[in-house]
Image (cartoon, rainbow, N blue to C red):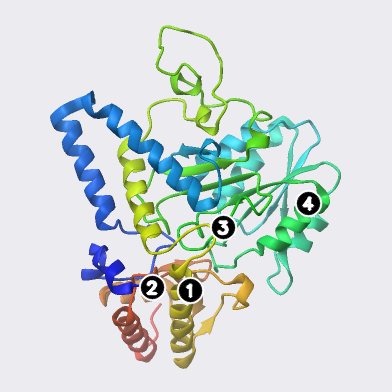
């Protein structure tokens, strides 16, 4: 992992030790250039550049497909994770009395769309999660013959707990239940091959580990599932004759792009593509991730330094469940005060679910680690604040 080369592409590193990629990531220089170039062309040439933008958009679709081991026809662009989950929730062929099983500690975007199905006679079963046990048996115990779908996060936003995809795949195969994976806290750092795992739907906005801007994400729909979903969010772009505006015929496209009903977030998607190209240049693929290997080693060192000052690492540290997120607590230190204190010393992190949360990317280096450590030691030796 060429950390120094990656770091040169991240303007944020000039000022901040940025340990908050699980919240909103900073843009790398190539994404910034992509937005600026689009803006200049849009201002100076208008829609005369649209064919070139559209061609680049398809390149981005191919890059996203390569990243997850999918076919480009299985990838749609969405505005965010919430819109992608809602699309699947509303398009799924539910019957009255069906249920969907969801861990109760999910981010709200992966809970509310399922609860909203009650008006259609579909029950959302929220399963309390106990970290001392494997997640899959807990979910399976909540399933019955009316369970049609299990929706869960690949990586938990709060403590970084990563689901074991091999165990998840075996469960899905055994029970014949469809799977939706909220991948926003893993995609862009961790490798995943959807040709290997029976994930039916995957959704992730690009503004976290993929280093894209907010408002540009991807939705994966397995080919075998596409025709069972109701067409939603349909418009001119949803039909096979998309650019023949005078022909009104609901001949839906045979690919996931049928859900991109109208004009895309062109600037956002082009910037996302530039970020994905950057990540790929450092070895991220569906099969491997030198970025993840580096970040996990970095977190090992950060965990040791947190424990050295008496802090408690909250995140599960089992190898199969680790991710790029580490949550920790400091005794007698108010979370809001702690975050302000870190920010004042040039360290960006978050407070979530009663703990502080750090989430470095692979351009963070030893200088960032030392800055974090200095801020941590000052905080723990200062008078307790509330």
For residue 155, above or below residue 258: below
Report if residue 309 is visible in the image: yes
Mark 2 nearby-residue class (10 Å; few <14, some 14–19, many ≥20): some
Which mark is on residue 335?
A: none
Which element carries disc 3, helix, strand or loop?
A: loop
Q: For the residues carrying marks 2 and 1, which lies nearer the camera in this image?
A: 2
State the SS at label 4.
Answer: helix
Q: Which residue is drawn at 59% across and 48% down?
A: 110
Q: Which residue is under mark 3?
A: 192
Q: 83 or 125, which is in the foreground?
A: 83
Q: Position of residue 83 (x, y in %)?
A: 51, 39
Q: Residues within 10 Å of mark 3 (few under 14, many from 20)?
A: many
Counting residues from the start of the chain, the first of labels 2 and 1 encountered is 2
Is 126 displayed left or right of 71 in the figure?
A: right
Q: Which numbered disc flags the more N-terminal residue, 1 or 4?
A: 4
Residue pictured at 29% horizontal, 81% vertical: 367
């Amino acid at each position: 992992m060429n950390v120094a080369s990656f770091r040169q592409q991240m303007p944020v590193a000039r000022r901040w030790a940025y340990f908050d990629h699980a919240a909103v990531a900073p843009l790398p220089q190539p994404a910034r250039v992509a937005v600026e170039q689009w803006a200049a062309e849009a201002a100076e040439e208008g829609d005369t550049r649209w064919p070139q933008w559209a061609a680049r958009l398809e390149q981005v679709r191919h890059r996203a497909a390569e990243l997850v081991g999918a076919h480009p026809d299985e990838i749609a662009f969405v505005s965010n994770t919430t819109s992608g989950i809602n699309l699947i929730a509303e398009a799924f062929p539910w019957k009255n009395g069906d249920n969907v099983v969801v861990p109760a500690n999910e981010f709200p975007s992966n809970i509310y769309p399922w609860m909203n199905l009650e008006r259609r006679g579909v029950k959302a079963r929220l399963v309390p999660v106990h970290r001392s046990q494997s997640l899959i048996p807990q979910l399976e115990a909540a399933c019955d013959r009316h369970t049609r779908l299990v929706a869960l996060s690949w990586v938990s936003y709060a403590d970084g707990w990563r689901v074991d995809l091999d165990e998840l795949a075996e469960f899905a195969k055994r029970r014949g239940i469809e799977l939706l994976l909220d991948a926003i806290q893993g995609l862009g750092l961790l490798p995943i091959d959807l040709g290997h795992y029976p994930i039916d739907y995957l959704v992730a906005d690009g503004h976290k580990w993929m280093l894209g801007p907010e408002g540009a994400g991807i939705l994966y729909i397995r080919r075998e599932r596409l025709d069972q979903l109701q067409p939603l969010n349909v418009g001119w772009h949803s039909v096979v004759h998309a650019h023949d505006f005078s022909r009104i015929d609901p001949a839906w496209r045979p690919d996931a792009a049928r859900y991109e009903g109208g004009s895309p977030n062109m600037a956002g998607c082009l910037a996302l593509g530039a970020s994905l190209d950057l990540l790929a240049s450092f070895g991220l693929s569906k099969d491997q991730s030198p970025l993840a290997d580096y970040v996990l080693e970095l977190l090992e060192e950060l965990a040791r330094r947190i424990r050295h000052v008496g802090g408690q690492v909250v995140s599960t540290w089992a190898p199969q469940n680790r991710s790029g997120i580490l949550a920790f607590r400091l005794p007698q230190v108010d979370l809001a005060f702690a975050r302000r204190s870190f920010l004042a010393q040039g360290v960006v992190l978050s407070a979530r679910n009663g703990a502080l949360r750090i989430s470095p990317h692979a351009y963070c280096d030893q200088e960032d680690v030392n800055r974090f450590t200095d801020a941590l030691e000052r905080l723990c030796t200062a008078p307790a604040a509330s």
